Image (tube, coloured by chain):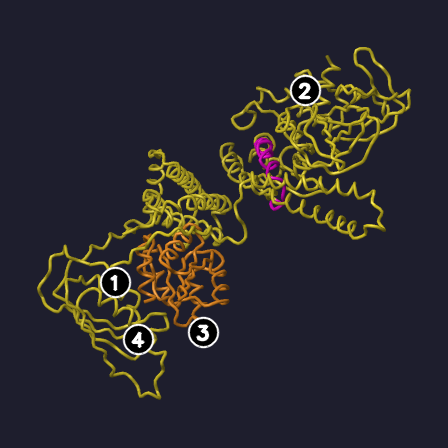
Chain colours: A orange, B yellow
Amino acid sequence: MSAEKILAVDDSASMRQMVAFTLRDAGFDVAEAADGQEALEMAQREPYRLVLCDVNMPRMDGISLVRELRQIPSYKFTPLLMLTTESGPEKKQEGKAAGATGWLVKPFNPEQLVATVQRVLG
Amino acid sequence: MASIDLKRFHRAFFEESFEGLDIMEAGLLRLDPAQPDAETLNGIFRAAHSIKGGAGTFGFSGITDYTHVLEALLDEMRAGRRALNASDIDLLLRATDALRQLLVAARDEQPVDAALTEAVHAELTGCLHGEKAGAAAAPVAAKADAAEGWRMVFAPHAGLFMSGNDPLRILRELATLGDAKIDAVDAALPAFDALDPEQCCLSWKIDLRGAVSRDAIVDLFAWVEDECDLTIEALAAASVPASSVTPVAALPAAAPSKAATRPGADATSIRVSTSKIDAMIDLVGELVITQAMLQQQASHIDPAVAEALLQGLAQLDRHTRLLQEAVMSTRMLPVDAVFSRFPRVVHDLAGRLGKQVRLQTIGESTELDKSVIEKIADPLTHLVRNSLDHGIESEDARRAAGKDPAGTLTLRAAHQGGHIVIEVADDGAGLDRRRILAKAAERGLSCDASMTDSEVWQLIFAPGFSTAAQVTDVSGRGVGMDVVKRNIESLGGRVEIGSQTGRGTCVTIRLPLTLAIVDGMSVAVGNDVFILPLPAIIESLQPSADQVKRVAGQGQVARVRDEYVPLVALHDWFSLPARPRPVHEAILVIVEAEGHKLALQVDALVGQQQVVIKSLETHYKRVPGVSGATILGDGRVALIADVGEIVRLATRAAAA
């Protein structure tokens, strides 16, 4: 069985590396994108089972990415998780309104990340 | 349980954090407090935000706390809830500096200068709460209530699936918390032919028994709280001690694998150490030489016999050139690498001098060799300091002269036929001809009132011109314009200066694009070939016997266009066994360096070509008058004459 494909989107290379490394270590197949625009283009080319995205990014932010992804038929039900440091409720609301499945509050440790992803992917 | 060592991500974190700081600094300097540009502010915020997020994740809590205040302040500015003024920008710049110190300390695992960072932190906090006291919400006290268990009614809205959520996921998770009895309620389920499989029509009743806190349950529903109707009631009133809260779902152990991290997938650039690039350039240089040797050998072959071979060689020639160009271009960096430091320099200096200065940079994307960029930074800084200190007038003086009270300093870079031209221009008062002449006379430099303007401007490059008399806090740290000129000439460049009274001064630097290749004239001296760098050559001529004279105490001189130029035969200079030909059978190459001309006597001009410079020092040792060596097409080694040094040594000998 091939590993589940996850798309990790963050403009911070260290965060992206951490997320990707952790998830690969847990047996997932992870692709990386540095901003929403790049992620959207990658998502259009091939399907991912889960998208993890940062909120604040250049070119296209995470909320716009979620909104765009939800409009692609094959991403209608795909879990889209936001990685957010904003503890205030507005960003979460905004993300939810755009169609996000849920969020993960930064800072998180690798174990939390793996647990959340495994929970979502069942 | 095996945990993942976060240390392996630290290097990337620090690298991008320092890049983030540069973005913040550049953005802050660009920001106009009166009309802050939203995208710039956003960029600054994003950088701070990323540093905070990374610091939290990678365990630098001191940096997280510090950046949090900075980020909160930036967020208010970004959201337009706070007006900006110049002192805010100053504060933010200082905060950026302090953050840099924190990061450096964390990277080097050194203690932090707490006094400084704390002072800035306090200032930031003061600034943040000054207008918005009490904004920081007290953390919500964790609820300690618990019960025998909980009864829940979970009724998702029809559109729950549209956010990628799945009730099953939540139910499964609930079951891990305790003993769960789950009943589906299908009352709202329509008839099969009316069923829309994309709508959620079921709801659930759940009885969960066990020592589970209410918060743990609420957390599970957090993602869907607006997409469902949820009631949670205690099953029994008995309260449970608060200590037994929130069992965490068991995590599968993540076995550390040997898989290496893929470096950040920045498709547009990668970091490569310069030594690798230099090795590549070296190898390509060898390849070019080998190719040239083959070409020379092939010139003896009859084309009728070996047509295919010759065609192949021609193709090899073309590809070698292209490869060489491509490899050389990897050493090229945009001049922005050095320009980008000036906004801060100008900002700080202008503040200290009490002047208003706008910095304009043009052509930042112009590329030149990394080693040239490194060596140009100091001379440029000196010129910029000079312009601010001596060039641009005070606000009052500018107003009195009917000029814009804010001065403009322009840095401009452009390519000009194999060279890069960098200008440092200001719209200040211009050079003062009278004062320069007076000072030159005072310093005992040769000058007179009939000199042209450009000759007068050249005086400021004379050694000893800028002296203690004009040392200020800003410029004149014992480094004069003569050092600037010498540094640039040692790069094979030239400096020119233009000035108009009341209109400003413009210093133009002309530099070769790279230090690894030189356009050279090959000249024959006896049985040897030497390379003279083309930029140093003014002209070459075949003298008549009466053009060359011997002057007592000065050796030979050549009369070139009514000017006497000292003459040096390269045979003598390099102590070659071959005797120089009689002068009227030889060639004189007139070269110029540091304002002095010299006639070099050679036997013949061989040709003009680009040569790859090989360091003589690494392969042999330093030789006076030789800047390096190259390998010719026939495999022979040719020395590259260091014209600057020969001129310096020869004129000194003549003057002595």
Label 3, label 1: how far apart the Cα atoms are: 30 Å
Question: Helix or strand or loop: what does disc 2 sit on?
Answer: helix
The type of residue carrying mark 2 is Ala
SS assignment at label 3: helix
Mark in the foreground, 1 or 4: 1
Closest to the observer: B531 or B339? B531
Circle 4 SS class: loop
Give the quarter of the image for residue A113: bottom left
Q: Earlier in the sequence, mark 2 or mark 1?
A: 1
The residue labelled by disc 1 is: B219
**Residue with the mark numbered 2:** B440
The picture places residue B88, in percent across and down from the top left corner, at 42, 43
Q: How far, Cα to Cα, is label 4 from label 2?
A: 88 Å
Q: Chain of mark 1?
A: B
Please check whether the numbered discs 2 and 1 fall on a single chain. yes
Q: Nearer the viewer, residue B172 or A105?
A: B172
| Residue B377, magenta (yes or no) | yes
Residue ID for mark 4: B157
**What's under tag 1, amino acid-wise?**
Asp
Residue farthest to the front, as pictured: B305
- The stretch in magenta equals B362-385
Q: Which residue is mark 3?
A: A73
User: Between residues B161 and B462, which one lies in front from this camera angle?
Assistant: B161
Instruction: Measure how far apart labels 4 and 3 are at the Cα level.
Output: 21 Å
Magenta-drawn stretch contains B274: no
Marks 1 and 4: same chain?
Answer: yes
Residues beneath discs 4 and 3 located on the same chain: no
